[in-house]
């Protein structure tokens, strides 16, 4: 068995790069805060899911066994508000956006987590946890809900490095609730407060008689707060202590801070060993928001002829912790680079075929070709150093340009790297057949073949140009030479 390379990662908890030591040798448990399904997910959300997918792929590439869980927030302040606004049930609203979410995830080649947990299906687990917190005196009841007293929580706010005045840091005695209370799921860092884990409905005695979304509970009918949802589902799916928990930096406070508070107070155990937070994505230098009209969905990119896989590639060219600025120009440039890579892969495949025909017995040898050792080492050094994907991508480009490698060696090496990159390079046609690009008249792949043919013509490599023409025709298109280059038509 291959020995496992040391993997380092930046832990938000310590603020440092640390050596990753899993709870169980050879295994990794990871929880990703999932989407709130009240609207389309935006490309910033997808940057964060590409990050968690990359983390999973790196661990798997390094021979560790992953158990990955993700929640679907299908009940919270936002989903309830939106379902009331649209006059549809919460179930109808969230089912619609959850379906769209998984379609986008698929087109980005993001692997499905092993466990997907809907919040509404786990309210029982949340009620159990709240009961424990009440029993331990960490939580208290008010007229509108159950709150966690942050004064009762040991080390409240360490993840976000909060400075909290007047806290008795979990010692015994009465909490003074100096900080006030907040029922809202989202509030700002400047204002740490006792937060709601259960919100009573108008009719506290019975869920059935209540018109709003509510569940019966021993402490009164109501619904869970957002933070308790993730605590309960993470513990349910992966256990009291897990290796990794992810999200973007906006979740450090209050969401993850409160998750730690509830979980550790309830179980008495460390909740998460490594917290990984991705940088935010802005659009044309501004925060994404509906009112600014820069709230971009994946479909908005596709409408501009940008493939989801090209977006994925562009995301990988920045370090996951850096803040990035989306611009159509930047992603278009990334798509051009990716197309070039596809073109190379097609060319290597052709050269490999020609080579195989020329030398009998070579087919067997080619089948045994392994990824180039030196580059593989360089690639692994990058990916195990806090998931340094820009460096890994740079190594991939070095492979394509190295004249010392044969086409077959290049292809094998790059397809091996693609297990981590996830650019579907083994099946380059999918770059053009991602759901929405299908509508395009000329598939991107055919354009790539035509460009490769043009290059062959310019090099006066007629047999190759003819072979590429045949390839284009086999896909149902014809190519005509023009002064500017070529035109493509459907046969
Ligand atoms: P939400 O659906 O709002 O709960 O967010 C889903 C995930 O996307 C969470 O991990 C957020 O931290 C992350 N996220 C939200 N906005 C952005 C953004 N602009 N850039 C990167 N990640 C984001
Ligand atoms: Zn969460």
Image (cartoon, grey):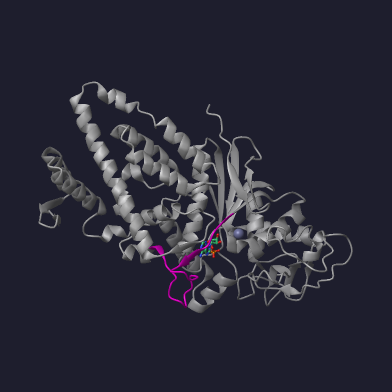
Q: Main secondary structure of the magenta part?
A: loop
Q: Is residue 473 left or right of residue 263?
A: left
Q: Check if residue 288 falls in the magenta segment.
A: yes
In this orientation, which residue lies closer to the viewer: 47 or 194?
47
Please say if 107 is above or below 453. Answer: below
* Residue 419: x %, y % from top left: 43, 41
Residue found at x 52% / y 62%: 280
- The answer to if 326 sits in the magenta stretch is no
* Total tally of numbered discs in the picture: 0
Quadrant position of residue 336:
bottom left
Q: Is residue 182 above or below residue 323?
A: below
Q: Quadrant of residue 366?
A: top left
Is 75 placed left or right of 354 in the picture?
right
Up/down of 432 relative to 375, above or below: below
Residue 120 seen: no
From where the camera sits, is residue 438 visible? yes
Residue range corresponding to the magenta coloring: 277-298
Left or right, residue 409 beside residue 491: right
Residue at the (22%, 29%) spot, across then down: 355
List x then y, in percent, for residue 14: 68, 51
* Residue 436 placement (x, y as % from top left): 32, 60
């Amino acid at each position: 068995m291959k020995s496992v390379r040391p993997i380092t990662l930046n832990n938000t908890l310590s603020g440092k790069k640390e050596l990753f030591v899993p709870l169980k040798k050879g295994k990794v448990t990871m929880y990703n805060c999932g989407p709130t399904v009240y609207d389309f997910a935006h490309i910033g959300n997808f940057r964060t899911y590409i990050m968690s997918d990359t983390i999973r792929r790196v661990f798997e590439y390094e021979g560790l066994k992953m158990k990955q869980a993700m929640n679907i927030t299908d009940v919270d302040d936002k989903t309830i508000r939106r379902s009331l606004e649209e006059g549809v049930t919460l179930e109808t609203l969230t089912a619609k956006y959850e379906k769209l979410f998984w379609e986008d995830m698929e087109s980005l080649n993001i692997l499905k987590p092993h466990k997907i947990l809907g919040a509404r299906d786990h309210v029982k687990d949340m009620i159990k946890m709240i009961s424990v917190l009440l029993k331990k005196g960490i939580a208290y009841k008010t007229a509108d809900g159950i709150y966690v007293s942050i004064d009762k929580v040991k080390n409240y706010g360490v993840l976000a490095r909060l400075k909290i005045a007047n806290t008795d840091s979990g010692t015994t005695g009465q909490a003074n609730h100096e900080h006030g209370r907040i029922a809202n799921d989202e509030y700002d860092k400047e204002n740490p407060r006792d937060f709601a884990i259960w919100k009573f409905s108008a009719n506290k005695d019975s869920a059935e008689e209540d018109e709003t979304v509510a569940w019966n509970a021993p402490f009164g009918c109501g619904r869970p707060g957002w933070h308790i949802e993730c605590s309960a589902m993470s513990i349910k799916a992966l256990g009291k202590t897990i290796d990794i928990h992810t999200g973007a930096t906006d979740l450090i406070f209050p969401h993850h801070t409160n998750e730690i508070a509830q979980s550790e107070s309830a179980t008495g155990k460390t909740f998460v060993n490594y917290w990984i937070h991705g940088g935010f994505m802005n659009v044309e230098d501004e925060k994404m928001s509906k009112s600014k009209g820069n709230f971009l969905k994946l479909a908005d990119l596709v409408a501009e002829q940008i493939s989801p896989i090209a977006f994925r590639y562009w995301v990988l060219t920045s370090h996951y912790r850096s803040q990035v600025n989306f611009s159509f120009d930047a992603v278009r440039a990334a798509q051009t680079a990716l197309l070039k890579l596809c073109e190379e892969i097609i060319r290597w495949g052709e050269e490999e075929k020609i080579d195989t025909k020329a030398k009998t017995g070579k087919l067997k040898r080619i089948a045994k070709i392994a990824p180039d050792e030196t580059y593989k080492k360089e690639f692994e050094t990058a990916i195990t150093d806090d998931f340094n994907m820009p460096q890994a991508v740079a190594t991939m480009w070095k492979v394509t340009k190295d004249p010392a490698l044969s086409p077959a060696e290049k292809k094998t090496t790059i397809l091996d790297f693609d297990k981590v990159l996830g650019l579907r390079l083994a099946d380059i046609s999918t770059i053009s057949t991602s759901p929405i690009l299908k509508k395009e008249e000329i598939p991107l792949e055919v354009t790539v073949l035509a460009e490769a043919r043009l290059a062959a013509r310019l090099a006066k490599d007629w047999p190759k140009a003819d072979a590429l023409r045949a390839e284009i025709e086999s896909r149902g298109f014809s190519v005509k030479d023009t002064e500017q280059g070529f035109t493509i038509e459907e046969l």
